Image (cartoon, grey):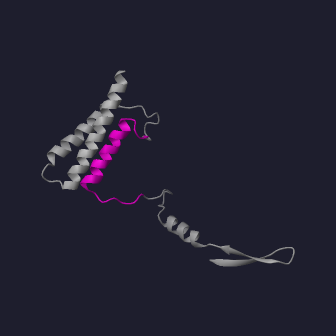
Amino acid sequence: MEETPKEHPTGFTARKKVDDSWKQSVEQEKKTIDESGSQEEPYVEPGFIPFASSLGLQAMAALGEIKDPARPEAKPDLRQAQYLIDILQMLFEKTQGNLSAQESQIMENLMYELRVKFVEKKRGALS
């Protein structure tokens, strides 16, 4: 931090403290911007949970629970949601015995939450 002296018209000299740490943050941010001008997303190692989570996010978007940039009106697409939930169910069944306890628990919780939201949306559509 630098102190910059500043004279006041009355002869009083004030010392203004300047915090230059923000410059380091900006320089770091500049390094993450690629040639196209967009910021790079952090790299996520491929794995079962990130893959299943991405399918779950797509299903939540299809249910209208989260905003989908491709569909600005956030109207639920129950057929797409059902398809994605079925894919997750198939994936869970095909990987039985090969998942860790944590992965199994995450999948069970994800599918439960998606099914509950699906039933809520389906009932709302029928009303």
Q: Is any atom of residue 80 visible in this view?
A: no
Q: Which residue does the image show at 43% across and 34% down from the upper left? A: 74
Picture quadrant where residue 90 is located: top left
Does residue 87 belong to the magenta stretch?
no
Q: Is residue 47 above or below residue 21?
A: above
What residue occupies the far left of the structure in this picture? 97
Question: In this picture, which residue range is highlighted in magenta?
Answer: 41-67
Q: Which residue does the image show at 42% across and 31% down from the upper left? A: 75
Q: Is any atom of residue 21 visible in this view?
A: yes
Picture quadrant where residue 71 is located: top left
Q: Which residue does the image show at 52% across and 65% down from the upper left? A: 30
* Residue 50: image location, x then y, percent: 30, 53
* Residue 48: image location, x then y, percent: 24, 53
| Viewer-nearest residue: 41 or 67 | 67
Left or right placement of residue 113 versus residue 6 in this view:
left
Which quarter shows the C terminus?
top left
Left or right placement of residue 36 versus residue 52 in this view:
right
| Viewer-nearest residue: 72 or 102 | 102
* Residue 83: image location, x then y, percent: 26, 35
Q: Which residue does the image show at 30% across and 60% down from the upper left? A: 45
